[in-house]
Image (tube, rainbow, N blue to C red):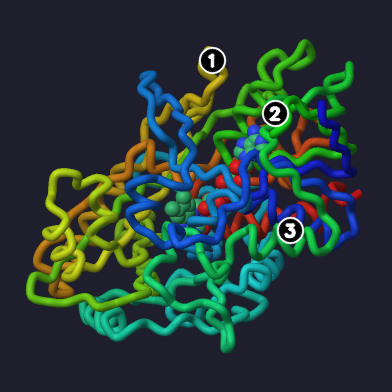
Amino acid sequence: MDHLEADVVVVGSGMGGGTTAWALAQHGVDVLLVERGERIPREPANWSPAEVFLQRRYRPEETWEDGRGRPFRPGVHYVVGGNTKVYGASLPRFRVSDFDEVPHLDGVSPAWPFRYADLEPYYGEAERLYAVHGSTGEDPTEPWRSTPYPYAALPHEPYVAELAERLRAAGVHPSSTSIGVDLRPGGSCLRCATCDGFPCRVGAKSDAEVRAVDPAIAAGARLATGVRVTRLLTDGSGRRVTHAVGEGPNGPVTIHGRRFVVSAGAANSAALLLASAGPEHPDGLANSSGRLGASFMMHNNAHVAAVDLFGHNDVVFQKTLAVTDWYEDGGDGHPLGSLQTVGKVQGVMMKSWATRVPLPVLDAVARRSVEWLVMAEDLPDPANRVTLTAAGGIRTTRVARGTRQHRLLHRRAKRLLREAGYDVVATQWFDISMNSHMCGTVVAGLDPRASVLDGHCKAHDLTNLWVVDAGFFPSSAAMNPALTIAAQALRVVAESDLAG
Ligand SMILES: Cc1cc2nc3c(=O)[nH]c(=O)nc-3n(C[C@H](O)[C@H](O)[C@H](O)COP(=O)(O)OP(=O)(O)OC[C@H]3O[C@@H](n4cnc5c(N)ncnc54)[C@H](O)[C@@H]3O)c2cc1C
């Protein structure tokens, strides 16, 4: 049996865990990152659409079950850096209203246990850590900021610049995407076509491995890879975690620490705490509220491809444009969501779902299309939850909430793109297996009877357990989640007693 020990043990090295470890290491804390996966090697396959999208080279073989017991392969990545290794590095701040209670068409988006102003300084710090490029004064819903973007927004390529003009003529206010790539003068980013959805072969994407885990190690943190934590155990009071157990490359592992941070990603963090049930907490660790696993969210998302039959899209780096005009008010006082271009889709990438369409046809479509993500808030519902299967696997039960506003946003997007000159708009609605924006399940709140964590992500029920990943989100907002996870990790380390 292998034994590991540290002052602070962090389970999971993705956005939440990697950033937490980085911040702890800056404070000189003895921190151990425990990661079930290994590092993705820098190899030609990093940038192969066929390897990444068709062969799913970097996805685990694992299956989860949906609410009806049907198996699916989740959109997760068990590697150092977690899902950020393949993310699109779109790193916007949430809007001020996202932290408040907001009525939506299909229900209410609840208030967070802290306000935008509480997180604002840490957003700035996270933008510096993740080298975010962005601009102010374009986005009609941008939140106020006390520090400038570290780097200027990525310039649009000519095709996207012209598209922005056409959208402006159609009456909206296109803005630059806030994005984390090393494209500063002398930076290592090549501005290639294989960023969003792919690992970066040259380490120029601001993922958690490059920007947080490796700098944390340089500052003294340790990383144990290939160790899957399976249970947290407590003392007799049930109020203090004493150690974790797991499976490592050489068999069983025990990990002792004074404080524990679970950052395994929304579904896995909930699953780990549920699997840690014991005599003092028969329904799962930190679950006196009964809310552990509940309010599983993943955004209501769709990809749309707008095809200009007589045009030619020669863009390389497409993910530079966003439209947020209807984010807080779609015209009747209710929020709708956000639109953003995604990385340029290649024909072979469409093959993963358009399986029967010949590749040359898909290539021809891709040359004429521009692709967008249409994102609306997924409202929290206690019935949507992560539970364990009889075999100890993950079951995600979810009936999407907030679908009316998503359909309205989708209709607006289609109309807008038609007005901008596109002939055909095709849609791929995301299903449960496309759960890349998972959040909720270990929700933070002021009331211990209705939430698992306090406003600084510490478990209400325990003295030395924090959960710092997308699981703490009380609502999903309709913006990409990663910067908010990172900012909260920095806030937790700075303001709670995690650093000792
Ligand atoms: C294709 C794709 C594109 C995306 N694009 C964007 C984007 O542009 N902008 C954005 O904001 N977000 C994006 N996201 C989402 C973003 O990556 C996630 O929101 C973010 O990584 C979540 O952070 P996390 O800390 O909750 O989990 P993760 O980053 O997934 O980290 C969880 C870590 O815990 C490890 N782990 C799990 N269980 C255990 C265990 N039992 N023991 C030990 N280790 C464990 C995992 O291996 C993983 O490393 C994208 C995601 C995908 C998949």
Q: Position of residue 414 (x, y in %)?
A: 19, 61
Q: Which label was assigned to residue 490?
A: 3
Q: Nearer the viewer, mark 3 or mark 2?
A: 2
User: Could you tell me which residue is drawn at 59 percent across and 47 percent down?
Assistant: 79
Quadrant in which the N terminus is drawn: top right
Q: Nearer the viewer, mark 1 or mark 2?
A: 2
Q: Which label was assigned to residue 247?
A: 2
Query: Image quadrant of residue 277?
Result: top right
**Res. 132 visible in picture:** yes
- Vertical side of 65 occupied by 442: above or below: below
Residue that badge 1 annotates: 391
Q: CA distance from mark 1 to mark 2?
A: 16 Å
Lower sequence index among marks 3 and 2: 2
Q: Position of residue 346 (x, y in %)?
A: 27, 62
Q: Type of residue at label 2? A: Glu
Query: Badge 1: how crowded within 10 Å, few (<14), some, or many (20+)?
Result: few
